[in-house]
Image: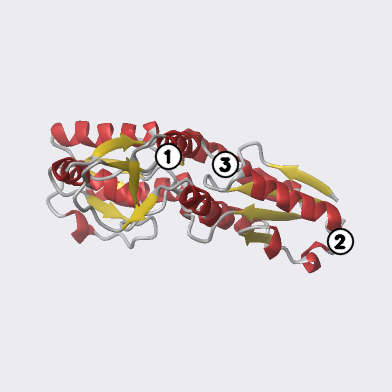
């Protein structure tokens, strides 16, 4: 059985950068707090916990404390509140997410209504929303589009969460452009996401079976799985090697592997090793 691993499988540069920043911060003498998990992967979260970085639900008095902002970024209000409470801030927001913040602010300043295609509950989207003075419209890529949603809207700029499926984003833009006379689309899907999605659009044709590795909490992993599953029904989403079912591999001559942006390399290796024992 041949094993083909996607070049882009695993950590993206934004996650690598955030983990390096977290690691450096943990080695300092400061007490580091973080609002939520650093990335959506249980294994990485465990490792971070071991370094002494503390996950918190809300900000409290921050004397001698440092707040680590995660790769997804955070709303402005969090920075302001943290500073007010006395926290020092270490910002690990991915530069590509920062760029989305800048784009959103620039277009809002020019008088555009901002439309964000993404998941309202996702931290990255909340971070973008929290940069803006006026409320943007957040649309899920699966949203039912109707004229009433855009009443009196003459001018809008559409951006998306960095990890959205580009095809779904384009579909939704086609649906909304008839309702808004002046619509600008700024493609804010990040390069690593694009690479992952491009690879997962060909791998399912070239392999009998596809394994997508990543946490069930990882939205970008979910999208890789959905894209692959549509092309090749023998696509399985696994968190780690323990979830592999040897029964899946009957008559399989080649397996394609990809992994979400928050999946560590050691998990990918353990999956590959397990596969080698199956064939
Ligand atoms: S998925 Fe893209 S935007 Fe998100 S952290 Fe990785 S590189 Fe940055």
Q: Of residues 163 and 172, which is closer to you in this image?
A: 163
In the shown orientation, is residue 72 left or right of residue 109?
Answer: right
Q: Whole-Å distance between the Cαs marked 2 and 3?
A: 27 Å
Q: Is residue 110 left or right of residue 5?
A: left
The answer to whether residue 74 shows anywhere in this view is yes
Q: What is the spatial separation of the Cα atoms under label 1 and label 2, in whole angstroms? A: 48 Å
Which residue matches tag 1? 26
- CB of residue at label 1: within 8 Å of ligand 1? no
| Residue 183 is at least partly visible in this image | no
Question: Do the residues under discs 2 and 3 have CB atoms within 8 angstroms?
Answer: no
User: Dot 2 lies on which element?
Assistant: loop
First of labels 2, 3 by sequence position: 3
Alpha-carbon distance for marks 1 and 3? 30 Å
Query: Is 92 situated above or below 134?
Result: above
Give the mark nearest the N terminus, 1 or 3: 1
Quadrant (top left, top right, bottom left, bottom right) of the C terminus = bottom right
How far across and down, in percent of the image, does residue 74 sit?
28, 45
């Amino acid at each position: 059985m041949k094993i083909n691993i996607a070049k882009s499988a695993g950590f993206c540069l934004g996650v690598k950068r955030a983990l390096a920043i977290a690691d450096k911060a943990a080695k300092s003498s400061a007490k580091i707090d973080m609002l939520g998990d650093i990335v959506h992967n249980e294994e990485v979260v465990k490792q971070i916990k071991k370094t002494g970085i503390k996950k918190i639900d809300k900000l409290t008095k921050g004397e001698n404390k440092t707040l680590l902002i995660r790769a997804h970024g955070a709303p402005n209000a969090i920075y302001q509140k943290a500073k007010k409470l006395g926290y020092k801030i270490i910002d690990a927001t991915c530069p590509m997410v920062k760029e989305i913040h800048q784009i959103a602010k620039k277009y809002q300043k020019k008088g555009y209504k901002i439309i964000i295609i993404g998941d309202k509950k996702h931290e990255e989207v909340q971070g973008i929303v929290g940069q803006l003075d006026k409320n943007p419209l957040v649309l899920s890529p699966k949203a039912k589009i109707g004229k009433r949603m855009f009443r009196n809207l003459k001018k809008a700029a559409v951006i998306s969460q960095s990890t959205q499926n580009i095809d779904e984003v384009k579909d939704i833009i086609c649906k909304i452009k008839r309702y808004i006379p002046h619509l600008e689309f700024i493609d804010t899907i990040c390069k690593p996401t694009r690479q992952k999605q491009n690879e997962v659009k060909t791998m399912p044709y070239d392999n009998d079976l596809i394994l997508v590795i990543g946490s069930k909490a990882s939205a970008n992993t979910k999208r890789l799985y959905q894209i692959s599953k549509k092309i090749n029904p023998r696509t399985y989403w696994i968190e780690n090697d323990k979830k592999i079912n040897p029964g899946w591999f009957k008559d399989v001559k080649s397996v394609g592997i990809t992994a979400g942006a928050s999946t560590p390399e050691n998990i990918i290796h353990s999956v590959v090793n397990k596969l080698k024992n199956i064939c």
